[in-house]
Image (cartoon, rainbow, N blue to C red):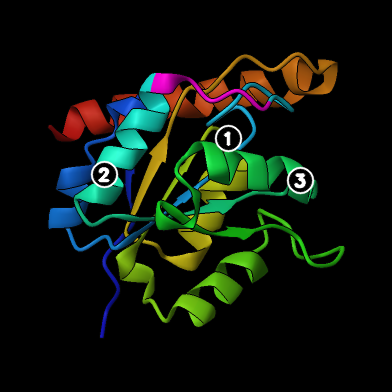
Amino acid sequence: MTRKPTVIELPDQVTDVDFAAWRRHGIKLICLDVDSTLTSFNGSFIEPHVVEAIKTAAKNGMRFVLLTNNIFGWRLRAMQKTLGGTSVVEAIYNPKYLFDRKPGILMLRRLQKELQLESSQIGVIGDTYVSDVQTALRMGVARVAWIVGYPRNDLYFRLFIGPREAKQRRRLAVEQAKKS
């Protein structure tokens, strides 16, 4: 059986993702990145309109998990609670050991096995190409929303990663525009 290519969408923020369309395309579970996607980098506040969008999608049958390289369980559990508890965000997947990090696929494989899902039933929403989009592409998930995300303050990201990612995003947007 041949695998369908991953569809990459370029919304500005989480609330721009059409969860109903993802559901119609067979997505059963969405993996949400945390830092700079749901919150500012290392922040804990989730905008009310984001919380509402995720709760509404969950009421309409979408399942959610947090998929993050962040290791601070207390912070992640607080976010899970803010989003509606385990009835909305059913699990938190973060590194169990040193090499269990994005862009590696070990966390996503563990999630897939524990939740008994095929790659074609999983979507990912994240803000960076290197850790979120590449992880999704390597796993062959059905859909990825590469959002703009919150601004990052760390110097390394601003100088080296950010400009490269912006260039990659523009290239992808041009390619998609040519196809449509």
Classify mark 1: residues with Cα within 10 Å, few (<14), some (14-19) or many (20+): many
Query: In x, y percent, where is residue 138?
Result: 52, 62
Query: Is residue 12 shown to the viewer in this render?
Result: no
Sequence-earlier tag: 3 or 1: 3
* Residue shown at 48% from the left, 57% from the top: 86
Q: Amino acid at mark 1?
A: Thr
| Residue 139 at x, y percent in the picture | 49, 66
Q: Give me the C-alpha separation between circle 2 and circle 1.
A: 23 Å
Numbered disc in front, either 3 or 1: 3
Q: Quadrant of the N terminus?
A: bottom left
**Dot 2 or dot 1, earlier in sequence:** 2
143 relative to 38, above or below: below
Residue 47 covered by magenta stretch: yes
The residue depicted at 72 percent of the width and 40 percent of the height is: 75
The residue labelled by disc 2 is 57
> In the rendered view of the protein, which quadrant contains the C terminus?
top left
Q: Which residue is mark 3?
A: 74
The secondary structure that most of the magenta stretch takes on is loop
Task: Note whether residue 86 is visible.
Answer: yes
Label 3 secondary element: helix
Disc 1 designates what residue? Answer: 128
Q: Amino acid at mark 3?
A: Trp
* 140 sits left or right of 133 in the view: left
Q: Quadrant of residue 48?
A: top left
Question: Which portion, as a residue range, is magenta?
Answer: 44-48
